Amino acid sequence: MRASLSRPPSNKPLLTGWGGTRGAGGGGPGLALGAAVRWLTERAPHRESAPKRRGKAPLPTPPPPLLAKVLDTTGRRPPRQIRLQCSRFCFAPSQVPMEEMEEELKCPVCGSFYREPIILPCSHNICQACARNILVQTPESESPQSRRASGSGVSDYDYLDLDKMSLYSEADSGYGSYGGFASAPTTPCQKSPNGVRVFPPAMPPPATHLSPALAPVPRNSCITCPQCHRSLILDDRGLRGFPKNRVLEGVIDRYQQSKAAALKCQLCEKAPKEATVMCEQCDVFYCDPCRLRCHPPRGPLAKHRLVPPAQGRVSRRLSPRKVSTCTDHELENHSMYCVQCKMPVCYQCLEEGKHSSHEVKALGAMWKLHKSQLSQALNGLSDRAKEAKEFLVQLRNMVQQIQENSVEFEACLVAQCDALIDALNRRKAQLLARVNKEHEHKLKVVRDQISHCTVKLRQTTGLMEYCLEVIKENDPSGFLQISDALIRRVHLTEDQWGKGTLTPRMTTDFDLSLDNSPLLQSIHQLDFVQMKTSSPVPATPILQLEECCTHNNSATLSWKQPPLSTVPADGYILELDDGNGGQFREVYVGKETMCTVDGLHFNSTYNARIKAFNKTGVSQYSKTLVLQTSEVAWFAFDPGSAHSDIIFSNDNLTVTCSSYDDRVVLGKTGFSKGVHYWELTVDRYDNHPDPAFGVARIDVMKDVMLGKDDKAWAMYVDNNRSWFMHNNSHTNRTEGGITKGATIGILLDLNRKTLTFFINDEQQGPIAFENVEGLFFPAVSLNRNVQVTLHTGLPVPDCYSSRASIA
């Protein structure tokens, strides 16, 4: 639609209500509408139809509406729909919670109330002084003048290509930069009190005595919106090219006036006293002492009108506000509205032809239309606010219900656990009674034996003393008469002591062993089950033994549901113990029916079991499957983790290098437990290099000799001698080197936490490293002068086995 160019009608306000002023830029209805939604969210009653309110308390009395007039520019009433929409949002000023609006009135850069706010093309506001602070100078090639000179028809405020300029760090690094701009150095990012990221100027602005609005800005300046982070380049007008937000200034003035508890004197030097009068001509609030001192009632000041402070506040509020003027023609007021540019314009802009091909409408008509559109938009927002309020009530009710249910459930849980504890205590008392019974029995047997042995010992001692006295007699005939009988008695008594008399009839150990592992396992598995369900738990899975196997330190298990099972399973839980008969732990949870577990210990026995689960609960465990891992490790080199210069052959068992520098390659299998031995044969050895052999962590450096960092333990060797090296520390120089055809053996004993090296089946030096523990991978570093082949699955050397058995 197009409108013919004509003088606009008088700018009468669409709404006059709380805080409203006559004339353009009053902003009263906008503030009332903006605060109405917040009032609805916190205080407005639920709107329900009459039938739904039966049996309930009557609706609370709504707040008295403001006096509202819905007028068009000719004084006629608009359609009823608009009148009703506007009346929904008009409330008394005392009932509008303006404090919730405070964040809308603060600058995102300085965090304070807007001072002389300007409107950016992205519709966000910023203080004029803050806008000057975040200006950044751009290269000459990006200026509007250079682009117009090159024939580009874009507007002065076209946004820069974000691929070309990145003013905001998405990674929250705290720095912003201009990609590809040599003249714009990287500058640190700051945060305003509102949490919005802003960018300081590239250099401090020069000192000037002009106001912020009139002070010149650097040529080719760029400004970035601190809220949406969109960037634009200023034209020759600088910040004067942005319109001032007079409506926002009026809203802030009214807000600050409404927040003032009492009017204070403006001339008190220290603690301002409460004002008693206000001079309408001076527009100053005075207390009594300051009025007598600064505003005596004589001379020209006698004609000034002094009014009470409250009346002075009202007169300030009702004073005509400055009318917004054109940014290009500061002496012209806005009179028309360009629909395409979405901005008010003056008649001089139209006469100059800047908007000749644009649709232009009367300012008053567009003012009325946009206020109507804002009112309609607020209708939908009001409904959403009401729904949010009802939802918050529902959530608060849920919080209360959850707390009540939690208390009830906790009481039930405590009662159940107390019942288990009582049962355990009763069983404990029964077991203690059995222990006490066994204790009394053992004591009785031992005490009886003590009593019996005491009597026998007394008799034996008496016999011995009697025989000693008989031996002292000098009468041979008398001695011989009783000697035979005494000898028989001594032998008989000796025999009696030798028939188990000196062996305890009872041991001190209690032949009782409490097996609490099933109970502990049950306690660990004690968990909640899903309640209020009608479907049963799935059937116990069946392990398919023909598909279960082990390879090296990996185990593969397969299972299935019973053939006649009708209850589906949502998934399965596979559990393994630690290889030492310890507790089970979950190693897989999912829907698959086959799983391979890697990284197990070599030469270890594992127990595995499986159970199914669905929304109702879990099934019983399957039968336990015993798995035995390999006694020795079979592995090859790992191309995935090796340096790119390593060359593989012979099914990844033979390696060499394409570089003259040392490069590292690891084995595929890692070791963390047990004794492991492998060998490497030297297939090629030219120019006396010094390859290194040993073990390393998975994250060892791959482009230096093995042992240069703290992630490797190695022996490097040439044709005459060898050294041990870890963390670039060389130790234990040992005579004896390698040639083509030599064999290097590596023995990793994680039971004793040692690493030992062999050359041609002879131990090279002492034990190389001790206290090695963790996960280790076989490792080799070499260059292009060396080629080695790996041999695995070997038994431990006999010499080491014999020494280990002796130790």
Image: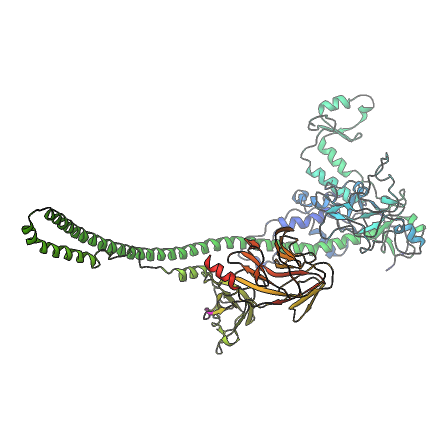
340, 515: nearer the viewer: 515
**Which residue is depicted at the point 8% across and 46% down?**
474
Position of residue 740 in the picture relative to residue 142 (left or right): left
Residue 380 visible? The answer is yes
- Quadrant of image for the N terminus: bottom right
Left/right placement of residue 477 relative to residue 179 reads: left
User: Residue 711 or 428: which is nearer the viewer?
Assistant: 711
- Does the magenta portion include 31? no
Coordinates of residue 661 in the picture (x, y in percent): 72, 58
Q: Magenta span covers which residues?
A: 620-625
The reply to whether residue 43 is in sight is no
Q: Position of residue 344 (x, y in %)?
A: 85, 50
Q: Is residue 408 above or below residue 310?
A: below
Who is closer to the viewer here, 279 or 704? 704
Q: Residue sitting at 74 percent across and 33 percent down?
A: 312
> Residue 338: x and y, percent?
86, 53
- Classify residue 325 by image quadrant: top right
| In magenta segment, residue 622 | yes
Vertical order, 15 against 424 (above or below)? above
| Depth check, front residue: 115 or 309 | 115
Q: What kind of secondary structure does the magenta stretch mostly adopt?
A: loop
Q: Where is residue 226 in the image (x, y as percent from the top left)?
A: 76, 48
